Amino acid sequence: VALGNLMGGVLVLIGLLIGSSILMNRSIKTDGAISHIFPILAYLFVPFIFTLDGSISRFDGLLMMLWYGWVLWYFFDVHHAHNIDSDAPRTLDKQFPRDCASVFIGMIIILLISNMIIRLSEVALAQFNLSGFAVGFIVFALGTNIPELSIVIRSWKTKAKELTISPLIGSALANPFLIGFFAFLKPFAVTKNLFYYDFF
């Protein structure tokens, strides 16, 4: 379920949400540099390479986490020259403590609800003999990317279309990292069926 959710999330983010954003905004400007696009595509394809042997090992997971660190460093280095002047004075918003409390409460609620969803999913998977990868891919991948959908809608309403792609790609890049992190904690076994190959 976790693997299907994270891998399906990449497809939802890149295909559905970025595609929807482009349709709503008619066009979105990019710098057009292939050197910026290739590392993203290569890293998003890494889980498929590592699952060809039917599993993701701890070593595979470690490589995925290290590769994610390199991708972040690469983009930070590429875009460092375009950063806003860091010497500008910063003030702490009075709302900040309240916002932190809201985030903390929200995280607790998410943990409780996600625990309940997983328990119900285990029952449903056993009852109806469904594939965990397929359920995670189809159902959870859509549900867990609702915040990114709200970014797409908000940016369209405020006509800030250039701000849409970065958070969506950033979220998509985090998914292979999470697969690597979970594989490092406990290796994944992967069932390579028609659905698996069709996804890739």
Image (cartoon, rainbow, N blue to C red):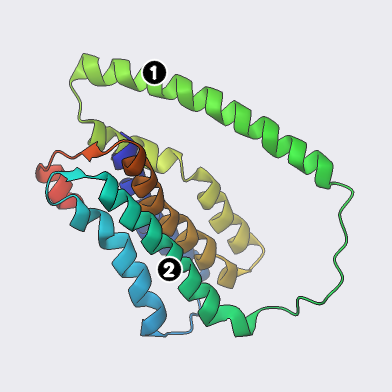
Give the structural element (helix, strand or loop) at label 1.
Answer: helix
> Which residue is drawn at the image coordinates 14% and 38% (left, top)?
191
> Are dots 2 and 1 in contact, CB under 8 Å?
no
* Residue in the foreground of this view, choosing between 59 and 17: 59
- In percent of width and height, residue 15 lies at 35, 59
Q: Is residue 51 visible in the rendered structure shown here? A: yes
Q: Quadrant of residue 56?
A: top left
Mark 1 packing: few (<14 Cα in 10 Å), some, or many (20+)?
few
Q: Residue at x 52, y 69 (%)?
A: 25
Occupied quadrant, residue 64: bottom left
Of the two numbered discs 2 and 1 in the rendering, the one whose residue sits closer to the viewer = 2
Query: Position of 172 compared to 108: left or right?
Result: left
Q: Residue furthest front?
A: 59
Disc 1 marks a residue whose amino acid type is Arg
**In this view of the protein, which residue sits in the foreground, 167 or 72?**
72
Of the residues shown, which amino acid type is indicated by label 2? Answer: Val
Residue carrying label 2: 71
Sequence-wise first label, 2 or 1: 2
- In this view, the residue in front, 56 or 2, is 56
Q: Determine the CA span between mark 2 and mark 1.
A: 35 Å
x then y, percent, for residue 36 = 41, 79
Residue placed at 60% from the left, 27% from the top? 109
Circle 1 residue: 119
Q: Is residue 180 above or below residue 44?
A: above
As helix, strand or loop, the secondary structure at mark 2 comes to helix
- Residue beneath the point at 13% across and 51% down: 197
In the image, 37 versus 76, the foreground residue is 76
Q: Please state if 29 lies on the left or on the right of 2 as rendered.
A: right
